[in-house]
Image (cartoon, rainbow, N blue to C red):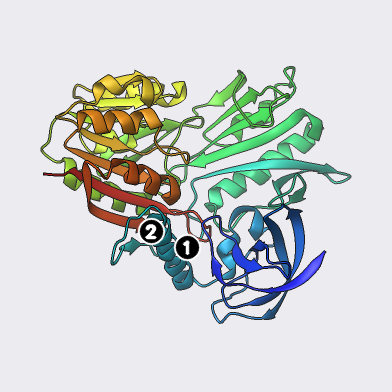
Amino acid sequence: MQEVVEIQKLVHGGQGLGTLADGRKVFVWNALPGEHVRIEISKKRRDYAEAIAIEVIEVSPERQEPKDEAYLSTSPWQIMNFDAENTAKQQILAEAMSREGITRDDIPFYAGEQQWHYRNKMEYSFWADDDGLHTALFNRGTHGKRIVNGSSIARPEIDEVAQKMCTILNSANIRGSQLKTVVIRCDQAGNTVVALFVKDENFPKLAELENLCQGTAVCFSNPKSPASVLTKELYAYGDVMLADKVLGKEISYDVHSFFQVNLPIFEQAAEKIQEQTKGKNNIVDMYAGVGTIGIACGADILVDIDQNNTAMAEQNAKQAKRAIEVIQAPSERAMEHITADSIVIVDPPRAGLHKDVTAHINEVKPSSIIYLSCNPSTQARDIALLQENYEIASLEGYNFFPRTPHIESLAILTLKP
């Protein structure tokens, strides 16, 4: 089904918002505010629809040609200039806060200069045809895949390794049915590590992988799960651990643990956090990952649910050469570490804070909350839940993920007098 609509604005998910002839709202990929576009509807719901613009009839002056054919798969905002992207993100952040009754006259928004080749981690799927195996990405909003040779937002070292891996797999006559995905990471120096996730528990040992990069792990992942989750490591070559400095502190991480994908702009936010914690005691990092923020900003306690993260956090705590307690647990089960004299750092997943965490914070009233978020909507919800006891000392937005709709925001909350 096709229809022509006018795009009113960009929304949090990254699509343009329009209205169908029947009055339903439609969320449109490949569309910018002010444009009239012919759309192909991909999903219908009772109250709304989703679509892709297949023709732009009236073109926004902010539109530009995307670098990648598969831009919708990884970075759908390649279609606009960088200034327009940053303005849109600032507006979406303000709207997310306003929906929860949080009004700010001006929310500063920070973006680095690097728009392309910034990601230090990529995950590619595979496509097999008569020409062999290829790296692939899923078409946005579908289960279908398309062949890609890389991405303009990935660091070049990552895509070089991805293509070398395909050559090795093809030489060994590996079938597409044996594979799930490949995760490739690199540090700021360009050292690269790989986790190849396979569905075949008897996957052959390929000696050629030893020279692929710094380290390669071949990991069996339960084929009943669509996600590439480590079930068992089958074998490994080299060292799959990397290290980078964050605010002068060396932070180690491996191919399986969480680490920020755009370190230079992340450090800008980390500097703001460090300003709030410098010289303070009883700092608790409740979604600590490998300790990236907590160790750089003087945390005494690191809490994370993931075993890979906490293993690396333990190592980073030892490297920091000071007493840091690392706890593997969901944050809602480690709330006894949040006390009235705590400074609490939180960087939760997109779902935001667990309701028990916000309830506990309201109950014990720690002196301040430092809240870094990858989802302004859930961050705004959580701040609204805390507003009875806390005021916003500062709120800033950051473009950690250029050419994508993703927004990072940092709120500093202080206890009301």
On the question of residue 175 being in view, the answer is: no
Residue type, numbered disc 1: Gln
Q: Name the residue under label 1.
A: 115
Circle 2 crowding by C-alpha within 10 Å: few under 14, some 14–19, many from 20? some
Residue 407 picture location, percent across and down:
44, 54
Which residue is depicted at the point 20% across and 39% down? Answer: 368
Residue 174 picture location, percent across and down:
79, 31
- As drawn, is 227 to the left or to the right of 282? right
Which element is circle 1 on? Answer: loop
Residue type, numbered disc 2: Ser
Count of marks placed on residues: 2
**Image quarter of residue 211:** top right
**Image quarter of residue 283:** top left
Q: Give the residue at the far right of this rendering.
A: 130
The earlier-in-sequence mark between 2 and 1 is 2
Residue 287 picture location, percent across and down:
36, 32
Which quadrant, please, contains the C terminus?
top left
Q: Mark 2 points at which residue?
A: 98
